[in-house]
Image: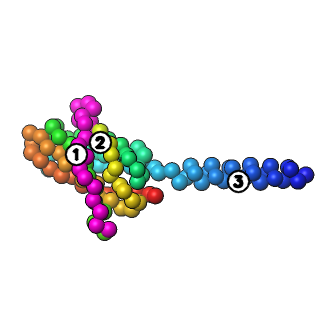
Amino acid sequence: MKWALIAAVLVAAAVVLFVVGRSAAAEPIEVSTTGTRYAATVVIPEPGTERVTAQVRLTSGAPDLVAVSSVMAEMGHSTPEITARRTAPGRFLAEGELFPMPGVWELSIRLDGPAGEEVLTVKALIGG
């Protein structure tokens, strides 16, 4: 009887940890923005405070250069610009540390091409 109770408690604890761990996982971020020269959607499949992958999908314009950086103005934090590499026409991939801490970040997407240079910005909430 005692062992059955201990086993039941251990199983219940494992289930709770599994459910809490799954719900604590960051949801993917997908945000779109439009400027005068370019329009883009940024997808961050696994946002967090470590190294991330940001996919930039252009829906308007054809830049030669795409770079991303982020700012948390309220805390005085910013990250260096990361140049994205072209993976397909209108598709770019940036990899690096964009969000050193949890909170609301402003993600800047700098695009430069025949139409000129433009910086598009979007907000992203990063959990810890």
Is tag 2's residue or tag 3's residue first in the polypeptide sequence? Answer: 3
Disc 1 and disc 2 in contact, CB within 8 angstroms: yes
Residue 39 visible (yes or no): no
Question: Quarter-wise, where is residue 39 in the image?
Answer: top left
The residue that disc 2 covers is: 94
Q: Inspect the image, locate mark 3, and give the three-letter code of the amino acid beneath it.
A: Ala
The residue that disc 3 covers is: 13
Q: Secondary structure at mark 3?
A: helix
Q: Secondary structure at mark 1?
A: strand
Q: What separation in Å lies between label 3 and label 1 (alpha carbons)?
A: 45 Å
Is tag 3's residue or tag 1's residue first in the polypeptide sequence? Answer: 3
Disc 3 and disc 1 in contact, CB within 8 angstroms: no
**Is the image coloured rainbow, by chain, by secondary structure, or in one colour?**
rainbow
The residue that disc 1 covers is: 67
**Is 55 placed above or below 25 here?**
above
Q: Inspect the image, locate mark 1, and give the three-letter code of the amino acid beneath it.
A: Ala
Q: Is residue 54 magenta?
A: no
